[in-house]
Amino acid sequence: MAFKKILNLKTLSSAFAAMLLFATSAVMAQDTTATNFPGADDAAKSAMWTTVGYYTLLLLLVAIIVGIVGKILRVYDLTLQLQGKKSVNWSNVMGIIFIMFLVAGIYGSLWSFFVQGNMLLPESASLHGVKTDAMFNVTFGITVIVFFLTQILLFGFAFKYRNTGKHKAYFYPHNNTIEKIWTIIPAVVLTVLVITGFFTWREITNSTDVKGDINIDVTGHQFAWELRYPGKDGKLGAKKYTLVTGTNKLGIDFNDKNSYDDLSADTLVIPVNHSIRLNISAQDVIHSVYMPHFRVQLNAVPGLPTFFKFTPTILTTDMRAKTENPKFEYLLYCNKICGGGHYNMQKVVRVVTDAEYADWLSKQKPYLTDGLKKELKLADNNNTQPKEAAQNRLALNN
Ligand SMILES: [Cu+2]
């Protein structure tokens, strides 16, 4: 009968929620460096899930043991009452559980801090990233101090002022001074943090100076990023969505002479210590350019071309040495869940020296392929006016 009472929707759903929370934390705690790339070792993956399953079952076992100990205490309490003795002081029991919870919680937080904290991104590989990291660290430092302070006070006071049997639990409903302190201090601290964040963000995004930047087009579609580099003229040609066809995937406008020498590339190769300007756009749904190692993220919104400027500071080879991972690659991800193939939207980003960059760029294929020339009825000689051909294309699209 008692067991049936426990099996109601409320307890079952809270137990399920707790299990889910724990299992998620266990998954997060796994070292995924061995499994986190395409074609990862299957054995490593299954070992990871075995560990998660083991800890989840362990949690279930601990919960059952706690339940049994509770029942034993209850029986003991009833026996005492039957014998006419003083019964168990449950407030004392609760007070002790509070302290145990505090100690276990602090241990768990510190464990998470040191074990999972090690899995954070390596140092920022871009100029502005150093500033955002500094802001993150300050915010993190403040919240850690506040977290430990408030948890110790919360559980410590619940223990200290409990009903001990000799005196009642201390009732202290209101104090204006304390209210003022914990309203004004967080308000001031948060204002300072938000304003610092505002100025840093403005500094990162406010540069409209294009001189000296390397312009690269990054266009998102379901499910890939298309990259376009300027040719020898250093300028990217115009784009027009109405010109998009199977061959002219990006809808490059070849009425614009700057388009002729544009290059298409598979890998985002960028020279170290140069300002890179990513011209970001999307063709279907909202995607998001996400390069965590450079602390870069900006949405790619259809119909709203935008850009992000950053300066890479650490060569891929140097980062491999720093992370002690010879296979390390910087990556460009999509950070919006944009559809079924979203997970597959990643490109390798390689930071190289100036000489390597020039060499790589000279090997890239022009965007204007023979197939495209034929489609646009462009003669091999680029001096021919392509206007008519492009208009024909437009007419076909309409
Ligand atoms: Cu996407």
Image (cartoon, rainbow, N blue to C red):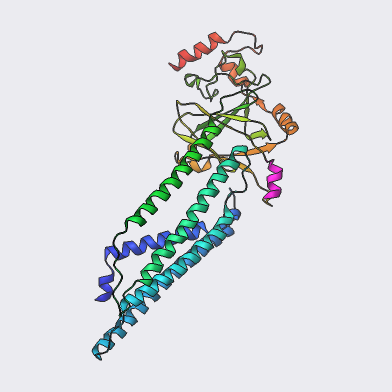
Q: Looking at the picture, how far across and down is residue 370, in whole percent?
A: 63, 20
Say whether residue 292 is left or right of residue 356. left
Q: How many marks?
A: 0
Q: Looking at the picture, how far across and down is residue 214, in whole percent?
A: 64, 27
Q: At 39% across and 73% down in the image, what residue appears?
A: 97
Going by the picture, which residue comes out furthest to the right?
Answer: 355
Magenta span: helix, strand or loop, mainly?
helix
Q: Looking at the picture, how far across and down is residue 218, in whole percent?
A: 56, 30
Residue 35 visible in rendering: no
Going by the picture, which residue comes out furthest to the bottom?
Answer: 83
Q: At 60% across and 54% down in the image, what residue appears?
A: 33
Q: At 38% across and 72% down in the image, what residue appears?
A: 160
Say whether residue 65 is left or right of residue 361. left
Magenta-colored span: 314-322
Residue 314 position by quadrant: top right
Image quarter (top left, top right, bottom left or bottom right) of the N terminus = bottom left
Q: Nearer the viewer, residue 126 or 43?
A: 126
Image quarter (top left, top right, bottom left or bottom right) of the C terminus = top left
